[in-house]
């Protein structure tokens, strides 16, 4: 034993290396121990699939897993049961810690009212893109007399004109009045009649008068 002590006294570098190695190992074990406590290792849960479930069933399933929930939004999907879960985050199958909060989007019980965007006095292509991107449907296009072809003249809903900012139900079927590029009803100005037209009219009058 004495020889071993004398050996370490004579070899300071080796002794310091052992000290550093021991300190490093203690640090590694300490970090692993802390991570084990912080992440609740062995207490993770698999997120269940609660999509399409009624809220009562979804809550019961989450609480059975030791998870909490928060409703963050509601949307309206036609043909989908009102009050049912539409989306969730994290997604089903994800691994999370117990007591983690699951964020839920549910289907609204009534149709969502949306403000109509500005969709007139622009091209048909632009108008359709804006309306459909805002949650509406373009059900019909009616062409009206106008010198401006494919210019949206008006947006119609249930037989009446609607304007930007008006609130109407989401996914409403809209009708667009669009310029045909020609004027169907043309009223001739007498000042623009040609000399041939005037002569023809005069001859017709002379033939009628006896």
Image: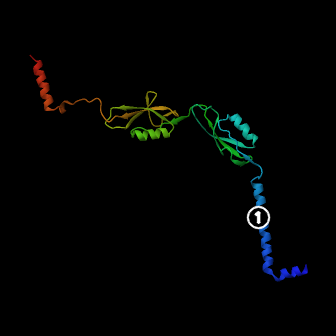
Alpha-carbon neighbours of circle 1 within 10 Å: few (<14), some, or many (≥20)? few
- Mark 1 lies on a secondary structure that is helix
Whole-percent x and y of residue 116? 48, 36
For residue 117, say whether it is visible.
Answer: no
Whole-percent x and y of residue 59? 71, 38
Q: Residue at x 87, y 79 (%)?
A: 4
Quadrant assignment for the C terminus = top left
Residue 105 vs residue 121, the one in the foreground: 105
For residue 3, say whether it is visible.
Answer: yes
Q: Which residue is mark 1?
A: 28
Q: Residue at x 13, y 26 (%)?
A: 200
Name which quarter of the figure residue 189 lies in: top left
Q: Residue at x 90, y 80 (%)?
A: 2
Quadrant assignment for the N terminus = bottom right
Q: Residue furthest left?
A: 210
Badge count: 1
Look at the picture and state if 203 lies above or below 58.
Answer: above
Q: Residue furthest top?
A: 210
Look at the picture and state if 22 lies above or below 110.
Answer: below
Asked if residue 206 lies left or right of residue 44, the reply is left
Q: Residue at x 12, y 28 (%)?
A: 199
Name which quarter of the figure residue 159 lies in: top left
Q: Residue furthest bottom?
A: 10
Whole-percent x and y of residue 3? 89, 81
**Which color scheme did the rendering employ for the protein?**
rainbow
Whole-percent x and y of residue 106? 63, 37
């Amino acid at each position: 034993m004495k020889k071993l002590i004398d050996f370490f006294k004579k070899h300071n570098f080796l002794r310091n290396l052992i000290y550093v190695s021991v300190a490093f190992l203690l640090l590694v074990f300490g970090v692993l121990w802390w991570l084990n406590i912080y992440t609740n290792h062995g207490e993770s849960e698999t997120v269940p699939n609660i999509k399409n479930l009624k809220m009562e069933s979804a809550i019961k399933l989450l609480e059975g897993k030791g998870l909490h929930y928060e409703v963050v939004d509601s949307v309206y999907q036609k043909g989908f049961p009102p009050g049912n879960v539409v989306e969730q985050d994290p997604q089903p199958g994800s691994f999370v810690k117990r007591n983690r909060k699951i964020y839920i989007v549910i289907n609204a019980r009534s149709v969502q009212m949306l403000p109509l965007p500005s969709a007139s006095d622009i091209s048909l292509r632009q108008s359709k893109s804006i309306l459909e991107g805002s949650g509406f449907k373009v059900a019909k296009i009616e062409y009206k007399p106008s010198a401006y072809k494919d210019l949206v003249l008006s947006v119609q809903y249930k037989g009446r004109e609607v304007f930007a900012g008006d609130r109407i139900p989401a996914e409403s079927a809209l009708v667009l009045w669009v310029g045909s590029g020609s004027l169907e009803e043309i009223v001739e100005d007498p000042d623009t009649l040609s000399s041939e037209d005037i002569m023809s009219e005069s001859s017709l009058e002379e033939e009628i008068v006896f």
